[in-house]
Image: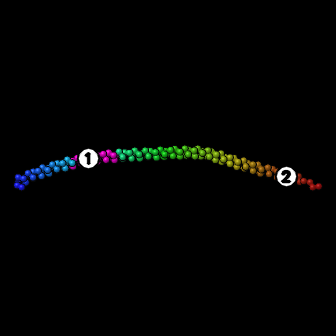
Amino acid sequence: MNSEDLNQIRVIVNEEIGATESRLREEIGASEARLLEEIKASEARSQEFARDIETHLLKEMQRGFDRLDRRFESFERRVERVEYENVGLSRSVSRSERNDTDTAATLAAQQRAIDDLYRQVAEIKRNLPPPSQH
């Protein structure tokens, strides 16, 4: 092999290296582009998944709030019934207290009348002539 042959081999090897280098750069660029597209697609799927989860959680929270609202409404109706019953019980207690007061006053008046009658009977007995003894 002479020097011209060696130069031609060098030229061919250099051209082959350049071509291989170009192909590698193109393949790397294409791989980077595909990888970038896959990353973007993955990000889009992740965002969609996050939106789906958020929507699901919001719906679940709304259902929970709706259940709480129904429970509070039910509780509120019960409290209103208790308040209404308390009004009735308060009136009943007031009537009972008035009746007790009236009864106590009547009993006191009756006792005074009985005591007065007892005094009158005692007075009449004292003023009667003694019974005759036969």
Q: Position of residue 9 (x, y in %)?
A: 9, 52
User: Farthest residue in the right direction?
Assistant: 134
Q: Quick one: 28 or 1, which is closer to the camera?
A: 1
Q: Position of residue 96 (x, y in %)?
A: 66, 47
Part of the protein shown in magenta? 28-47
Q: Quadrant of the C terminus?
A: bottom right
- Residue found at x 16% / y 50%: 20
Q: According to the image, label 1 marks what residue?
A: 34
Q: Position of residue 67 (x, y in %)?
A: 49, 45
Query: Taking 54 as reference, is 19 left or right?
Result: left
The kind of residue on which mark 2 rests is Lys
Query: Taking 68 as reference, is 37 left or right?
Result: left
Q: Which secondary structure is most common in the magenta stretch? A: helix
Q: Quick one: 84 or 118, which is closer to the camera?
A: 84
Q: Which mark is residue 79?
A: none
- Residue found at x 33% / y 46%: 45
Q: According to the image, label 2 marks what residue?
A: 125
Query: Taking 12 as reference, is 75 left or right?
Result: right
Question: Is 46 inside the magenta-drawn segment?
Answer: yes
Q: Earlier in the sequence, mark 1 or mark 2?
A: 1
Q: Position of residue 104 (x, y in %)?
A: 70, 49
- Residue found at x 72% / y 50%: 108
